[in-house]
Amino acid sequence: MFQDHLNLRMKYILANPNRKDNLQQIYQLLARNTDKEQVISCYQEALKTYTFEDFPEQWATTQNYLGVAYHKVGNLEQAICCYLSALKVYTRESFPEQWAITKYYLGDAYGVRITGDRSENLEQEIICYHDALKVYTFDTFPEQWANTKNNFSHAYRERIRGERAENLEQAITCCYDALKIYTFDAFPEKWAMTKYSLSNAYRERIRGERAENLEQAITCCYDALKIYTFDAFPKEWATTKNHLGLTYIERIRGERVENLEQAITCYQEALKIYTFDAFPKEWAMVQINLGKAYGQRITGDLAENLEQAISYSQEALKVYTFDAFPEKWAMVQNNLGIFSRRLTTLRNIGNFQKTIDYYLSALTVHTRENFPEYWAMTQVNIGAVYLSQYRINKERTEDLKAAIDCYLSASKEVFTREAFPQKYAEVQDNLGKAYKENQQFSEAYTAFAAAIDIIESFRQEILYGSAIDDDKKKLAEEWNQLYQSIVEVCLDLAKNEPLYYVRAIEYIERSKTRNLVELILDRDLKTIFPSEVADQLEQLRDKIASGQYEIQNNTAENPKLLAQNLQQLRQQRQELQDRYLPVGSGFRFDKFQPTLAQHTAIIEWYITNQKILAFVVKPNGQELTVWESQPEDLECLSNWENEYLQDYYTRKNQWQNQLEKRLKQLSKILHIESILEQIPAHCDRLILIPHRFLHLLPLHALPVGESYLVDKFPLGVAYAPSCQLLQQVQQRQRPDFQSLFAIQNPTGDLQFTDQEVNSILSLFPSHQVLSNSHATKAAIDQAVPHLQEVDYLHFSCHGHFKTDSPLDSFLLLADAKVSSIPMNADPKQYFETSKGIIDLSKCLTLGNLFERGFDFKKCRLVVLSACETGLIDFNNNSDEYIGLPSGFLYAGSSSVVSSLWTVDDMSTAYLMIKFLQNLKAAFDGGEDVSVAVALNQAQHWLRNITWKDLEEWANHLQLDSSNHPEAERSMRQMREILAKNPRRKNIDEKLFQSPYHWAGFTAIGK
């Protein structure tokens, strides 16, 4: 029955060779007939009648149809032969439309051809599409033009020759061209197909911001799935799900754990359609991808995940055999090598021969000529194996040399800076590690520096500057180890060339607090730089942002030229900025050191995976020195940290009782006395720049001999997140200290905050207070314009640092406590504590402070007299300074006083009152006393005060005359509490001698 229908149809087609729908009819016939060889046989039979000599046009038509048939069954060599035969008759001049469609299908065949040189096949594919578009123009054949553009996109994405970045830009442009015709309404299926192609191109894109490219790839996939539903287009649905999984594996935004699980889910969904029996090739590809996902999986047991990855890869080999699919077979071999190496390392087996065999097998197919990218990737993987073998057995120096050779081959021949910047950076990082192992420190430094230059360029390409700046943070987290590596190499080189100590601290600064430094620089542009320079920097910034937007959104006329221009603009802006304030990648120690006051020294800690470092910066151009710990010191610090945090979060009383003892232990672990020996005797002011966990500790309270570190420096011990940030806040001129804005006891449950605030009010001629139930988020929002003119902000309330979500760390305001979480509410908006539920939207959070509305442009000081206001996110690997102080520094304050733990209400109130008395008296007396000095003096006073002294001092506190009844009431309450305290019997007791009471607050900034 079918044969008769086919014969009739073919007679009709051959008698009418110029009908435009003939090829579509052939495809329809092939789709309905399971015996495709039968169709091919019909065409071959027809060619016996329609010869080239007697019926050239019909012969060419039949060759074309036969080519389509061969193409459909996968006989690409015969298909290409048929298309080329048809072109002997179908010339552009005589048969332009038939010539174009034959060129189109010939290009399609070259694109999937297995035999021959892969790069040459792809070039032939591109040439064919170029030819087809000479006829298929936008105006005359819009649909065919769009279809060719879509295929063009795939060809450029796969292309081996030419510049990789430019090829991908061409691929993206072709997709956007196709979408001019293939709209959602007019061609929904073609629209979905093009969206899928666009997703592929964005996932691999080199130009633009990597994180944003991947988000666009994900968006395109979800767009395609609007049409490619499970029921309507099951195969396309599965294909898109598979690609979505690939994109989630590479995704930067979001949580890494969740992204990997999402990828696995996508692959498992694809397998609902891609079964072994129905779609063996596609089934095998999903097996490969599941292997990749499990090879990186974080959830579950690592060894079991790797075993599962190997199992999926071996399953793929049931289909992807060497003979049938050599390219895919080689890909699986490479993946098996990766999983084998990780599993061998994890289990300390020590024998990597099986791993190397996998890689060598892959190279039998992935040659330098035909698959340069895969070849280079395998070289890098082999290099990693050799480096691992050397680390196990240091006598195998030939392995180390082999590793270096592999990395050099990959980076010089394929993964160049221009063509594959991300891969180039990765290879340079690995090369640096190999050189470091071989004690070739100069070569290691060069490799690490080259990698850092690339990472810095990636940072500049990130479009969206915001307070959170998650993309930049994740970039810093990913490459933080690279900065550690170059610091370690600098220290090795500094043994013979002390200049490298300077380079070490410069790289440390380049890795620290970068987001905050850049945000403050942008915000304070007009106050840091002369007006004409600020204008130039703004103009350059806007040009760069506009150009990056064009590249990111594929609207640039000449993306390559624009990318080059942007690089020049960035360099121009950096050079102009560095002439006045070298920060970020332009930080220069020799420019920073002269800004230190004459008697000021800095201790900047830096913790690597191997040791604790303390850089001692001295004034007047004196030589930078570095203290280095022994490995056992780092282990002791790690154990000390675990015990400290365990007690703090689970056994508060024990933590408090052990604090003095623990600080003595910490002083020994950090060898603080040895570090102090490097500071000149004339230095009477010290600035501490902690690192990571050290930010959480009262380093100023470290015991030194019979006293404390703070006692050694009469002009104070202050803190700073980094040298760069210190440099920035020093630019802030805040000459006045007369006006006060205060938040007073919003929850009404703090006994001493009323007295604290009322005592402080009398010191300031101008003040505004939001007290008790009036201290709401809405009231603060209304006061925002007024805050621009305030010299001093004082928050006396509850506070909390959220370790799981630092940007939600908050100061608790009135009306923030709720009885229950409303139905369908965002759970992230609420925080459940042992004392109730808190609505974060009614608190002042760290995230709020990064909103542009908060502008403390005249603020000299912010005091956060609350719990945990000085804690930061020390778990993140980005070396960012993320805590409430960073928010207030960003908003404009030049100094912040904050707490390192859950503080005592009584001792905090006394400390704050005395501190403000000291600072205000010095200011009114014309003395140039820093915030740190006034705070340190108050801390010294508090730890030495007796009951008798305290009562006498309290009786002489001045009251705020404008609020006398309220002030008198709070004063009376404080005296009553003091009088009733059972410890009062010992009037000479120093009741606040424990560091818990006096050491919890630090002065950060100017």
Image (tube, rainbow, N blue to C red):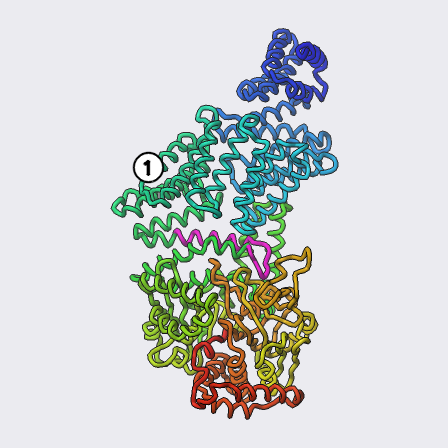
> Can you give x and y, in whole percent of width and height, for residue 10 in the image?
68, 12
| Residue 444 showing in the rendered view | yes
Crowding at mark 1 (Cα within 10 Å: few <14, some 14-19, many 20+)? few
What's the residue at 55%, 54% (across, down)? 471
> Can you give x and y, in whole percent of width and height, for residue 474 in the image?
51, 54
What's the residue at 48%, 41% (across, down)? 294
Callout 1 amino acid: Gln
> Can you give x and y, in whole percent of width and height, for residue 158 in the image?
53, 35
**Which residue, as the protein is rendered here, is positioned at the far right?**
185
Q: In front here: 133 or 515? A: 515
Q: Is residue 183 left or right of residue 236?
A: right
Q: Is residue 446 above or below residue 69?
A: below
| Residue 733 showing in the rendered view | no
In the image, residue 463 lies in the stretch drawn in magenta: yes
Q: In front here: 306 or 190? A: 306
Asked which quadrant contains residue 139, the reply is: top right
Q: Is residue 552 above or below residue 834?
A: above
Q: Is residue 756 above or below residue 498?
A: below
Q: Is residue 753 above or below residue 342?
A: below
**Where does label 1 land, which residue?**
353
The segment highlighted magenta reads 447-470
In the image, residue 378 lies in the stretch drawn in magenta: no
Which secondary structure, mark 1? helix
In the rendered image, which quarter contains the N terminus?
Answer: top right
Q: Is residue 1005 left or right of residue 839?
A: left
Q: In front here: 553 or 628? A: 628
Q: Main secondary structure of the magenta part?
A: helix
